[in-house]
Amino acid sequence: SQQGEEDPQALSIQEGENATMNCSYKTSINNLQWYRQNSGRGLVHLILIRSNEREKHSGRLRVTLDTSKKSSSLLITASRAADTASYFCATDPNTGGGNKLTFGTGTQLKVEL
Amino acid sequence: DTEVTQTPKHLVMGMTNKKSLKCEQHMGHRAMYWYKQKAKKPPELMFVYSYEKLSINESVPSRFSPECPNSSLLNLHLHALQPEDSALYLCASSQDLGTLNTGELFFGEGSRLTVL
């Protein structure tokens, strides 16, 4: 079963607006990653935040992590039509094994002109 | 070179066929992965190879048989599949950080499999 649940399942906004997606997970983690997937294509890594970090920025992306609430959020500022895609959080569980990235349910973002 | 190359892009096979999916990377990554993704669902982990050894098998049916011939190549052998196995099969690679962390995954574009 998936480690993460994402909210909302789908989000439709106008170009220039900000988009916020939330991810909740169940067990303790080493890190949490966000990926983007254009329809039917491979996934592209966006950002990684470690369990001892609370916030991270990369260009128009801002990720927060609250390990006490087992949740993360991804903010895309000044969205563009090209940001239209599915966004997945992925968690690296702190089970000592490594290499076991598990994906959340995903948010489908549509940015309209 | 930051590419993961998967072939074929599309595959149609009958339930009695034997086929293989191939994946190649030249980034020097020592961890390689197979994920399965059904439409409008997240990728589900199938197998992980670490330094050419199978390290994770997520209880995948034996009709899927992975192989890692060397550090750059990963294969998925398919035999006697069912129509419900139709999906996008994604290969990925990453640096192998051992038990400390899972690093950034680099994905191929996937092989879309249809089982008739």
Image (tube, coloured by chain):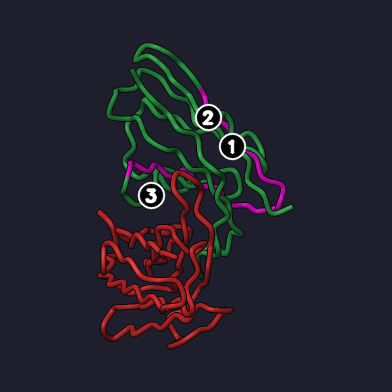
Q: Are marks 2 and 3 on the same chain?
A: yes
Question: What letter labels the chain drawn in red?
Answer: A
Instruction: Measure the alpha-carbon separation of dots 2 and 3.
Output: 17 Å
Contact, CB < 8 Å: mark 2 with mark 1? yes
Amino acid type, residue under disc 1 in the picture: Gln
Between B114 and A60, the residue placed more toward the observer is: A60
Q: Is residue A46 left or right of residue B41?
A: right
Amino acid type, residue under disc 2 in the picture: Leu
Residue A48, percent from left and from top: 51, 73
Q: Are marks 3 and 1 on the same chain?
A: yes
Question: Which residue has dot 3 on it?
Answer: B43
Instruction: Name the element at disc 2.
Output: strand
Question: Which residue has dot 2 on it?
Answer: B21
**Looking at the image, is mark 3 or mark 1 earlier in the sequence?**
1
Instruction: Measure the alpha-carbon separation of dots 2 and 1.
Output: 7 Å
Residue A93, percent from left and from top: 37, 67
Q: Quadrant of residue B71?
A: top right
Residue B23 included in the magenta stretch of the image: yes
**Looking at the image, is mark 2 or mark 1 earlier in the sequence?**
1
Question: Which residue has dot 1 on it?
Answer: B6
Amino acid type, residue under disc 3 in the picture: Pro
Circle 1 chain? B
Circle 2 chain? B
Overall secondary structure of the magenta section: strand
Display colour for chain B: green
